[in-house]
């Protein structure tokens, strides 16, 4: 009976996290970088690279920023603001360490309204037996840096032309939930208690064999 209890405790300790895990797997983007060029109205002016453990996603999209990013001279008092990036195409899609056809990758709100990444999004990739649905975390602390070239406009006034912008963000892997850690510690404590009990109440040796009875 003690052996059975010990086996159950070990199973509980190592599978506590699995027992309470979401049935939909969660992957993590820990590094994000994007480069944006002028948008002359055709879109596709943003290229992005998103990486993490078992994750490598690259693609292109567009940002509607025509007021200042068209490549034409704008006054120095023009308000610079970023908006949501709309994905046009994925070039590569590695999810959970598996390479998929990038044409089969879809996200729900990967990018936020300010041109960055949402902290949590959902998506799916693959087809038939390879199809999976997943959640994706991403760094939400990124920022854009802009490169404008000073020029003289047609009236001889100082103006600025947008050339390029870069975005970068990074985040460590999320730590386990406190409840999960508590369950793991409880399981380990159970193993220790049962092991101590077994040492205290050992079975007597079998007569005539000199061997300790096993369970």
Image (cartoon, rainbow, N blue to C red):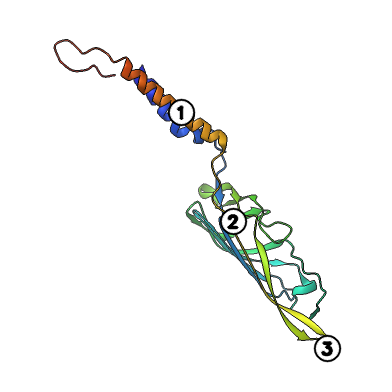
Q: Residue at x 21, y 13 (%)?
A: 205
Q: CA distance from mark 2 to mark 3?
A: 46 Å
What residue is shown with label 2? Answer: 105
Q: Earlier in the sequence, mark 3 or mark 1?
A: 3
57 vs 198: above or below: below
Give the foreground label among 2 and 1: 1
- Total tally of numbered discs in the picture: 3
What residue is shown with label 1? Answer: 187
Q: Are marks 2 and 1 in contact (CB under 8 Å)?
A: no
Q: CA distance from mark 2 to mark 1?
A: 39 Å
Q: Please tell me which residue lies in front, 105 or 4.
A: 4
Q: Position of residue 70 (x, y in %)?
A: 75, 76
Q: Position of residue 31 (x, y in %)?
A: 56, 59
Q: Is residue 155 left or right of residue 189?
A: right
Residue furthest to the top in view is 207
Q: Residue at x 50, y 35 (%)?
A: 17
Q: Earlier in the sequence, mark 2 or mark 1?
A: 2
Q: Earlier in the sequence, mark 2 or mark 3?
A: 2
Q: Are marks 2 and 3 in contact (CB under 8 Å)?
A: no
Dot 3 falls on a residue whose secondary structure is loop
Q: Position of residue 155 (x, y in %)?
A: 85, 88
Q: CA distance from mark 3 to mark 1?
A: 75 Å
55 vs 66: above or below: above
Dot 1 falls on a residue whose secondary structure is helix
Q: Please tell me which residue lies in front, 75 or 43.
A: 75
């Amino acid at each position: 009976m003690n052996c059975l209890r010990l086996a159950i405790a070990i199973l509980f300790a190592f599978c506590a996290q699995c027992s309470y895990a979401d049935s939909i797997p969660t992957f993590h983007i820990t590094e994000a970088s994007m480069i944006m060029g002028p948008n002359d109205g055709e879109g596709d002016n943003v290229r992005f690279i998103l990486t993490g453990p078992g994750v490598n996603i690259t693609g292109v999209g567009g940002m509607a920023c025509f007021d200042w990013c068209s490549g034409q001279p704008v006054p120095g008092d023009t308000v610079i603001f970023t908006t949501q990036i709309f994905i046009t195409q994925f070039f590569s899609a590695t999810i959970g360490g598996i390479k998929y056809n990038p044409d089969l990758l879809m996200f729900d709100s990967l990018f936020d309204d300010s041109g960055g990444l949402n902290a949590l999004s959902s998506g799916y990739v693959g087809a038939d037996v390879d199809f999976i649905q997943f959640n994706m975390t991403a760094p939400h602390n990124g920022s854009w840096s802009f490169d404008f070239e000073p020029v003289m406009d047609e009236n001889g006034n100082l103006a600025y032309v947008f050339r390029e912008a870069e975005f970068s963000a990074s985040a460590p892997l999320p730590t386990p939930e406190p409840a999960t850690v508590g369950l793991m510690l409880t399981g380990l404590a159970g193993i220790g208690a049962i092991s101590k009990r077994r040492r205290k109440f050992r079975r007597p040796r079998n007569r005539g064999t000199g061997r300790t009875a096993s369970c």
